[in-house]
Image (cartoon, helix red, strand yellow):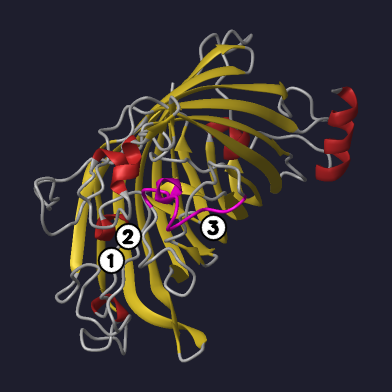
Amino acid sequence: MRSLSYILVVFLGATSASAAELTRVASSLEDKDPFGMFMNFTYDRTQDRAKIVREWYQGGTTEDISELRYTMIEQKLGIDLHIGLYHDVELHVGVPIVFGQDRSWGFSGGTTKDNTSIYRNCSNADGSLCTTPGLGTGRLFEIDNGQASYRGGLGDLTVGLAFAPFVQAKDDTKPTWVLRFDYTAPTSALLMPQNPVTGANMTGASNRGGMGDGVHRYKFSTAVSKRLGGVFEPYFGIHYTLPYKSGKQYSNCDDLTAPAMGHPGNCDIVVNGVQYWGRDEQGVQPQHVGGFVFGSELTLFERADRFQRFAFDIRGYGTYHSEGRIYNEMSDLFGKLMYTSDYAEAGGQAGIVAQAAEFILLRAYARYGYVTEHFLTYENIGKDHDGNQVVDVTTHPDELNPSYDFRTDRVGRRFRIQEEAVFQIMVTVNFNF
């Protein structure tokens, strides 16, 4: 630990001051501060816009054809409490209240109901074809006048611990280093994928659907910061989230009538006492998430004796999401969880930190991120259960993945999301006690 501290000092430099917000920890039982606690209220508005394209094989070649424009707007209030338990040991708990998580789809520029491939399907999800594949009148879903889905409510509860082995304010030869562990429990109302226009579970602006996926999440993170010359305070952090499925989750096998299920009957197949496909296997396959953040606070004004401070905060970040079966940008249109390929997001964030008194602090940020393109229909065709090293589509159809849709998951017909940009505005009011 001592060797690591020296490395961090060399990397971040040396002088004294308080930690950046990324490395802030509530502390109690200090000599002049027997109890430490602070509470944050954060308004967060996120806009996610993208184009959805489709592979289209015809004439001996595969092309990407533009199909849909996708928009998601989410507004929520985050409430979190940080309580100092001991010297630089903190317990924190938080929950978001999501006022609205609204999604909409419409044809992209140049695409109409007369030329979209979405309206030119005559094959079925199970792979059976008509005489002129790709030239039929069958529709994957309706999009004529646009589509929309509406979700909201209380989000998942998070509780965690933070510990700072080194605090620069106590020893200016060392940076501030924080270790964190957060557990997020699946407390939110369960999300039920559905067609946003029809069905008993139809969502609406006054009848919002749930958002929970029934997944426990264990997040491990660490961050360091160091105040340099009383002005600059660079910081760096890394994080990883380990998901674990609970018994409370939606499964594609819960709705055997969904038109996007190629072989729903395989959900219940048992051979020699072994269930080939089951509710758990066809449920959510959560993504592993990892990433980093780096940046610096730039203090332009400070009166420590009066607890007054004004600073700029500029940071960059990168986040990786593994592949998995999740609720993605097309789940509402197909009425099921969709297997999604892996992707990354990179971007930047800029904001201000302003404090005029001891007990209140304001932070405001704007963030822009770019998400790499990835497949939204990416189910595996099946599993080899008889040991012949192939999935027997015709002679052994019980090897077919029930969620596999021949219209959208096979090469030459898959959907992919491109040009995805995320813009976020966050305003936090922090109360110190």
In the depicted view, which residue is nearer to us: 56 or 381? 381
In the depicted view, which residue is nearer to us: 157 or 343? 343
Q: Is residue 390 in the magenta section?
A: yes
Label 1 with label 2: CB-CB less than 8 Å: yes
Looking at the figure, which quarter contains the N terminus? top right
Across and down, in percent, residue 398 comes to 40, 46
Amino acid type, residue under disc 2 in the picture: Asp
What residue is shown with label 3? 349
In the depicted view, which residue is nearer to us: 17 or 67? 67
Magenta highlight range = 389-403
What residue is shown with label 1? 124
Q: Say if residue 79 shows up in the picture.
A: yes
**The residue tagged with tag 2: helix, strand or loop?**
loop
Q: Say if 289 sits above or below 124 in the image.
A: above
Q: Of the residues tagged 3 and 1, which is closer to the observer? A: 1
Residue visible at 36% across and 25% down? 247
Of label 3 and label 1, which has the lower sequence position? 1
What residue is shown with label 2? 126
**The residue tagged with tag 1: helix, strand or loop?**
loop
